[in-house]
Image (cartoon, grey):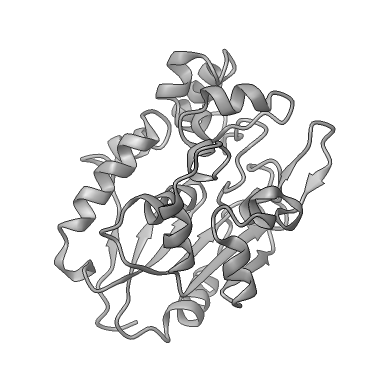
Amino acid sequence: LPGVFVHSVQLGSSEGADRNAGFFGNVNNQIDSVCESLSAIEELQDGVNLMGFSQGGLFLRALVQRCPAIKAKVLVTFGSPHGGVARVPECNSSDDTLCQWMRQLASKGVYSWYIRDHVIQAQYFKDPERIDQYLQYNIFLPDINGDLEERNESYRERILALDKMVLYKFSEDKMIHPAMSPWFGFVDADGNDIPVQNSAMYKDDWLGLRGLDEAGKLSMLSLDGPHMHIGEDVIRDIVAEHFGASEKAVPFYVQD
């Protein structure tokens, strides 16, 4: 898209600090910080198209819900755990020190006070056998998914205000479990899949997903291959398909 302003969200002052923030920190604080910084960018004031990769797509969706200064038009996410994860995500390599450290800490108890406040992946962990603890102790996902009894109606309004929401999952994803999470699906305590259409979130339209779907603005698509294996040509085609027709909206990218 020639002449289009593109902004990549960065949480740290360097590449290393930014990657560290993908494992350790408080997602709620990070989203508040990103909201404040993006609100000050003049080129984003007339509306934005949003693209998020892996957990970045989940956080970007939370930004849409929580940041009224961002006038989101199109949201596209790839392999993003919108429904949460029932297992702590795997590491791409045994040499990935940050990821291995995250998994070691998470193994000590994702709902313990320190881990839940400081390990990013614990903040979207949802144990299907301990839903009561998830609702009581998880500091992030129950709120943005409307799982709590007191729901923020503005979240639904901002999702419904989207022109389009496009959710991609990967056919051979071993990183995100359950595999239906990128489509807001999950599993029950016995491990049975719960498609989002069978969930109370969708049926009662807590987040506006059913409203988007009935308006033809929600797409759930699949890409062949493992988690986040996307060719450059595929990305170009997706950008052209979902962003190309919007003249005033401005794409920016959030990475994992």
The reply, left or right, for residue 239 in relation to residue 9 is right
* 68, 250: nearer the viewer: 68
The reply, left or right, for residue 131 in relation to residue 119 is right
Q: Residue at x 25, y 59 (%)?
A: 69
Q: Quadrant of residue 244?
A: bottom left
Q: Residue at x 58, y 28 (%)?
A: 135
Q: Is residue 202 above or below residue 236?
A: above
Q: Is residue 252 visible?
A: yes
Q: Position of residue 59 (x, y in %)?
A: 43, 47
Quadrant in the picture for the N terminus: bottom left
The reply, left or right, for residue 221 in relation to residue 195 is left
* 71, 99: nearer the viewer: 71
Q: Residue at x 41, y 54 (%)?
A: 154
Q: Is residue 16 visible?
A: no
Q: How many marks?
A: 0
* 68, 178: nearer the viewer: 68
Q: Residue at x 57, y 34 (%)?
A: 91
Q: Position of residue 148 (x, y in %)?
A: 55, 36
Q: Position of residue 151 (x, y in %)?
A: 49, 43
Q: Position of residue 233 (x, y in %)?
A: 52, 75
Q: Is residue 141 above or below residue 82?
A: above
